[in-house]
Amino acid sequence: MILTLFKTELIKQKKGFIWLIVTIIPLGTMVAMFLDMYLRYHTYLYGLAQNNKVTSWVILLKENHNILGWGMFLPFFVSIIATIIYYTEFENNSWKKHLSLPVSKVEIYISKFFVILFFSLIMIILNSLGLLIVGKIIGFPEAFDYKLYANYILFQFIAILGVSAIHNFLSSYYESAITPVIIGFISMIFSKIVLLARPGIAKFIPYTYTHYANNLNGESKALVVYGGIISMAILLFLGILSFKKRDIL
Amino acid sequence: MEKYLVETNNLTKSFGKFTAVKDINLKIKKGVIYGFLGPNGAGKSTTIRMLLGLVNPTKGKVKVFGKSINKNRIDILKNVGSIVESPSYYGNLTAYENLYITKEILNVKKEDLKKALEIVGLSEEKNKKVKKFSLGMKQRLAIAQAILGNPELLILDEPTNGLDPSGIREIRFLIKNLTKKLGMTVLISSHILSEIELIASEVGIINKGKLVFQGTIDELHKNSVEQIKVNVKPKEQALKYFNSKGYKVDIRNEYIYLKNCLDPSSITRELVMNDLDVYHISRYKSNLEEMFLSFTKKEGTNDINTF
Ligand SMILES: Nc1ncnc2c1ncn2[C@@H]1O[C@H](COP(=O)(O)OP(=O)(O)OP(=O)(O)O)[C@@H](O)[C@H]1O
Ligand SMILES: [Mg+2]
């Protein structure tokens, strides 16, 4: 049934605003990274790569993740996606119809969660695809590092699991589309501050996990995987409990 | 076999301190069209939401097909088609796509979808975006969606709200046909009695959250008390006299209606002997509309004693 619901969710988003969002954001990052590379690659970044004995692809990934701030903004983008998915029901006043059909509320809630993950994953993949295109246009001498970028995509995906669960709840809870997005924005800023000031505490804030998704060595890897999966499990469970009890008015 | 298809037991819903539905005991038999009547804000939609398991009752039970909605929600909803309040739809999708979503969830055949479109007369417009539909078309789409799974029970909350007279007639015709041809049981809510009268065989009247009447239309007719309608002058003096005799009166225009007095001849004699001029006297039975109003009127405004 969850699969059927997932399919119907995609029909609802057909030609919807969400497709614009998940393509335009990565398009923006691609343009920004192109400018960055165009201006700084030959004069500075290529030398940096040489000195650090890494490929240009590694440098490009770090520019995207840290300098452009993709790692910081990703949870905020997820919050926008979640809001659009739920707004479709609020806007059309269709919760009552949806829940008058013979489907369990839990399955509806979980299928929405999967749809949020699906669109977030598309956005993440398109971002990396954009980087590939930038590298090719600039003409990196090294061959494309498939493994690095596949891992990058995978770890970003795991890193957003907790945030997606939070925004699955918030977007289902607030009828106003703007509230969860504002919460997402404030949490993003707040997490960045905590991350800089109190890295110990930041480990418990799901919004920070995406920051680590670029640095694929032991400790960050473990934090992303455990943090992402555990926070998802807990928050999804709490969200389900609340959603099950809620009156549909 | 259960006696009732839908049965509630002291069904109650409070929002904070405000009680929207109070101790309602609905009893709906199989195969009937049940009219659920009440003025705006009476609690019809709230009750219907509880029947569908959308809203948890504060107190009381809902049984549909003899099963508790609490424990068997999904099982029950497989056989219930519904419209709750205004029709809901995904505006940027076509009528067909809207129905397709429901079809997928109900797991019925594409032919059923086509049939539903045909029944409500939307086959021609099925590829039009629903946000471009007129209200009547949206209502018909909502009905198509409700009947898609061939349900045993249809719950329609004000399906004719906002329609013009011909639209209302069309939908009434449609609903009557559904029960006749497909044997569905229908609960239809409305705040207009005359509309329900034409379609329903049983009615429940709800006012301020309470069920004030439940029974067949015939029983509702019987419930109308006979009154005596008089035109007597001088009016003031007549009222004084009726009051002294303990009659309950109701004044409308130049007429006085006497409620607990059923003998015109003795009343005439009494009036004449008291030097009052009788211009008109007749037996009077209130029509359904007036009864509905009297059922749903605020307490205290029914008996007017003006002195
Ligand atoms: N979520 C809510 N919070 C507070 N009060 C509510 C809520 N929903 C409904 N009510 C109140 O409950 C009462 C019954 O509302 P309901 O919608 O059931 O009436 P109705 O009979 O369907 O009216 P209408 O004919 O206007 O559709 C109203 O007074 C309404 O203000
Ligand atoms: Mg209503």
Image (cartoon, coloured by chain):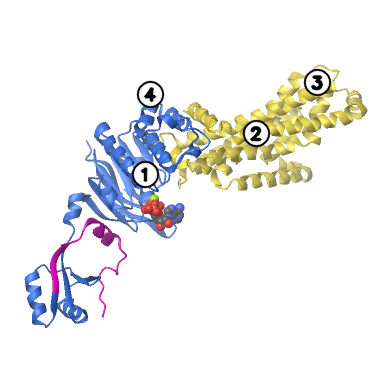
Chain colours: A yellow, B blue
Task: Of the two numbered discs 4 and 1 on the same chain, state the one appearing first in sequence.
Answer: 4
Report, in whole angstroms, how far the alpha carbon at label 3 lies from the one at label 4. Answer: 52 Å
Q: Amino acid at mark 1?
A: Pro
- Badge number at residue B111: 4
Magenta residues span B279-307
Q: In the image, A29: left or right of B206?
A: right
- The residue shown at (54%, 42%) is A172
Instruction: Name the mark on residue B120.
Output: none
- In this view of the protein, which residue sits in the foreground, B246 or B98? B98
Mark linked to residue B159: 1
Q: Nearer the viewer, residue A190 or A220?
A: A190
Residue B66 makes an appearance in the image: no
Separation (CA) of disc 4 from disc 1: 24 Å
Question: Which chain letter matches label 2?
Answer: A
User: Tag 4, which chain?
Assistant: B
**How would you rate the neighbour count of disc 1 (Cα within 10 Å): few for under 14, some for 14-19, many for 20 or more?**
many
Q: Residues within 10 Å of mark 4 (few under 14, many from 20)?
A: few
Residue, disc 2: A20
Q: Is residue A84 located in the magenta-colored stretch of the structure?
A: no
